[in-house]
Image: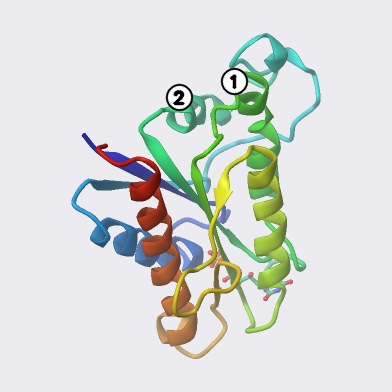
Amino acid sequence: MSLRILGICCSPRQGQSTFNAMRVCLDAAKDAGSQVEVQLIELAGKTIGPCMACNICRQGLICGWEDDFAEFIPVLADTNVAGIIIGTPVYFGGMTAQCKALLDRCVMFRRNGWLLRDKVGGVLAVGGVRNGGQELTLQSVRAAMLCHDMVCVSDGKDSAHFGAALYSGGPGGIEDDEDGLKTARNLGRRVAELAMRLYPGT
Ligand SMILES: Cc1cc2nc3c(=O)[nH]c(=O)nc-3n(C[C@H](O)[C@H](O)[C@H](O)COP(=O)(O)O)c2cc1C
């Protein structure tokens, strides 16, 4: 049996800072236990439109849009998924439009049996500067997770604040942001630790 932790990278740019930070985070999650399996998904290159409030999803796990969100429905609804970590660049002090569209479209899981309930939630934000709005961004993504009755964690001891917060604008990018990388590792480990406690035996 395995316990899966998903990392969803919401940058429009493939393989960049948020992706690399998420890899660090998921590596730490994997190292937390032999039963932990991780999956990194990128939204870059995908087309996910904003929720149009058409309410078709009140009839089931279906959506009025015919776009790439369809491939995420079975991935997110999978009962083997014990934790979800959302990673987003900071855009004007908040999450990217791609991230917001994904979160809004997830309303279907709430309307069809609260399918994300009790999954462990963690958030990672990468800004261009050290104090560019990472904490605001973490908070707004976490608010969406709470609306699903997910169990949100901090970045865990010994950094333990509001999630993983990194910045990419230093000379060496996130690779030189030791404090930020520590929060990414701690977040991954913390999500895995709590998932193992909530779902022992998987
Ligand atoms: C439209 C836009 C708005 C941005 N706003 C902010 C911001 O408010 N604060 C910040 O620290 N960085 C801001 N940035 C910089 C990005 O957060 C930063 O470059 C980040 O590393 C991008 O993530 P990525 O490398 O994974 O694409 C902004 C970038 C863009 C394109």
Above or below, 120 relative to 62: below
Residue farthest bottom in this picture: 171
Circle 1 residue: 113
Residue 5 shown left or right of residue 100 in the figure = left
* Residue 52, image quadrant: top right
Q: Nearer the viewer, residue 1 or 22?
A: 1
Circle 2 residue: 74
Q: Position of residue 122 (x, y in %)?
A: 52, 56
Residue type at numbered disc 1: Gly
- Residue 35 circle label: none
Q: CA distance from mark 1 to mark 2?
A: 14 Å
Element under disc 1:
loop
Residue at 47% from the left image edge and 69% from the top image edge:
156
Residue type at numbered disc 2: Pro
Q: Earlier in the sequence, mark 1 or mark 2?
A: 2
Residue at 64% from the left image edge and 37% from the top image edge:
148
| Mark 1 closeness class: few <14, some 14–19, many ≥20 residues within 10 Å | few
Residue 180 shown left or right of residue 108 in the figure = left
Q: Position of residue 100 (x, y in %)?
A: 70, 46
Element under disc 2:
helix
Residue farthest top in this picture: 59
Q: Position of residue 145 (x, y in %)?
A: 63, 45
Residue at 48% from the left image edge and 27% from the top image edge:
77
Residue at 36% from the left image edge and 54% from the top image edge:
192
* Residue 199, image quadrant: top left
| Quadrant position of the C terminus in the picture | top left
Of badges 1 and 2, the one in the foreground is 1
Above or below, 34 relative to 150: below
